[in-house]
């Protein structure tokens, strides 16, 4: 199998995974288009295109070991989930850089008990 044939079958597999993901999102949104709630289609299109690209890249990378269209298609289907699984073990922590200490706020004026007048500057 040539690299471009493997890439096309991987692209088809990535598309199949995206269609399955979209169908699950439609079901979870109560059988309506899931992007109608948020109003922005851009992030969803990015996820679909990323799945297509990942499917094509993985199948292309393995093209010399692939014997036919079915394994390339399966690589394309599994690529987004495999990459997601690999990245799930990566932990992201907040930066540990020291921040500059902020100047302390001036103390609040003290208000005393009953019968005493309040100073104007204490208001």
Image (tube, rainbow, N blue to C red):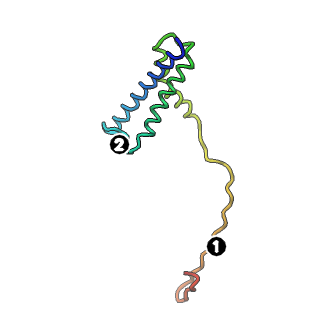
Pick the front one: 47 or 79: 47
Rendered image quadrant of residue 91: top right
Q: Mark 1 points at which residue?
A: 106
Left or right? Give the position of 87 relative to 13: right
SS category of the residue bearing label 1: loop
Say which residue appears at 37% left-offset and 41% top-offset: 35
Give the image location of residue 87, x and y in percent: 56, 33
Give the image location of residue 49, x and y in percent: 47, 31
Label for residue 36?
2
Label for residue 87?
none
Say which residue appears at 47% left-offset and 35% top-offset: 46
Say which residue appears at 36% left-offset and 31% top-offset: 23
Residues under labels 1 and 2: Cα distance? 50 Å
Total numbered badges shown on the rendered structure: 2
Rendered image quadrant of residue 44: top left
Left or right? Give the position of 25 relative to 46: left
Residue farthest front in this picture = 4
Pick the front one: 108 or 70: 70
Query: Vertical placement of 62 versus 103: above or below?
Result: above
- Quadrant holding the C terminus: bottom right
Pick the front one: 83 or 9: 9
Give the image location of residue 79, x and y in percent: 51, 25
Query: Within 10 angstroms of label 1, few (less than 14), some, or many (20 or more) residues?
Result: few
Query: Vertical placement of 86 versus 102: above or below?
Result: above
Left or right? Give the position of 112 relative to 43: right
Query: Within 10 angstroms of label 2, few (less than 14), some, or many (20 or more) residues?
Result: few
Q: Earlier in the sequence, mark 1 or mark 2?
A: 2
Rendered image quadrant of residue 64: top right
């Amino acid at each position: 199998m040539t690299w471009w044939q493997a890439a096309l079958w991987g692209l088809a597999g990535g598309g199949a995974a995206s269609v399955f993901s979209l169908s699950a999102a439609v079901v979870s949104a109560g059988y309506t288009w899931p992007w109608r709630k948020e109003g922005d289609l851009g992030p969803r299109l990015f996820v679909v295109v990323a799945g297509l690209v990942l499917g094509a890249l993985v199948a292309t990378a393995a093209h010399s070991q692939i014997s036919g269209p079915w394994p390339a298609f399966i690589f394309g289907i599994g690529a987004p989930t495999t990459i997601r699984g690999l990245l799930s073990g990566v932990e992201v922590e907040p930066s540990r850089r020291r921040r500059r200490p902020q100047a302390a706020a001036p103390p609040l004026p003290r208000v005393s008990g009953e019968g005493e007048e309040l100073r104007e500057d204490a208001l």
